[in-house]
Image (cartoon, grey):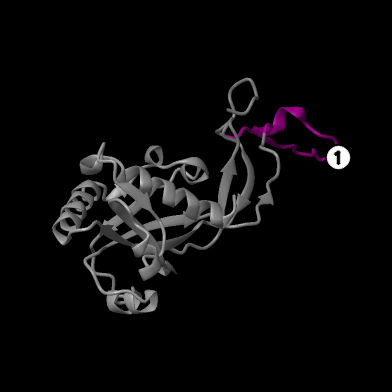
Amino acid sequence: MKGTTVIHEVDEVLKGLLTGGALASSGVEIAFEAPTRDWAARRNGPVVDAYLYDIREDVQRRQRGTVPVRDEQGAVRSRRQPPRWFRLAYLVTAWTKRPQDEHRLLSAVLATLMPHETLSPDQLTGPLAELGLTVPLTVAGAGAEARSMADVWSALGGELKPSLDVVLTVPFPAYPEYDAGPPVTEGAAVRVRGIDGSYDDNLERAHRPSHLAAGGAAQ
């Protein structure tokens, strides 16, 4: 799975959230464009725009070592580094012909996203869901590391307008993967040699791994 695929999946998850809740059946378009003056001038109908303006690693979530990758039977087939977590910050704005309608749309967005403090794997899609990890979501939070909204609007060449800062902290898988050895199917045995140099089968001791069934097959 490529890193760009993860960002695309986050876009789809956010779009799915925004088209539900208070905005369900509203017919409002969901866009991911940079809200520049030229883009705003081409709008013909109500739009909620979620512009990805900042990507930063959440270094407090970084882990060391390796994690196992298991097959369908639960056996370890390879190992890889733990995923790296990144904060994807979206500038969410509403675009209509009247400020009052834009405020109503922003209220609907806020009401729609507030219940989703975390997203479970079954709320995610594609490769992002396959990681089996929970994704935190914050809306209109105070981010000390994020750029000021005035700077963002200045860079976009537009006028400052009401917006919501929506941040999803998502895992990016680390590569490459390292092959792991086959699972253990037999236990270790210890044989004791007698004084005459021969092995005494009565003194043989065997140890069976706890994860093996009585028949010797891996669970």
At mark 1, the secondary structure is: loop
Q: Nearer the viewer, residue 136 or 19?
A: 19
| For residue 148, side relative to residue 2 (left or right) | left
User: Outermost residue toward the top?
Assistant: 215
Residue 116 sits above or below residue 94 on the image = above
Q: Position of residue 6 (x, y in %)?
A: 50, 52
Q: Nearer the viewer, residue 99 or 115?
A: 99
Q: Which residues are magenta?
A: 185-209
Membership of 91 in magenta stretch:
no
Q: Residue at x 20, y 55 (%)?
A: 106
Residue 107 sits above or below residue 36 on the image = above
Q: Tell me the quarter of the image containing the C terminus.
A: top right
Membership of 205 in magenta stretch:
yes
Q: Position of residue 162 (x, y in %)?
A: 21, 66
Residue 29 sits above or below residue 36 on the image = above
| For residue 86, side relative to residue 151 (left or right) | right
Residue picked out by circle 1: 197
| For residue 79, side relative to residue 131 (left or right) | right
Q: Nearer the viewer, residue 128 or 111?
A: 111
Q: Residue at x 30, y 54 (%)?
A: 48
Q: Position of residue 164 (x, y in %)?
A: 25, 62
Q: Amino acid at mark 1?
A: Gly
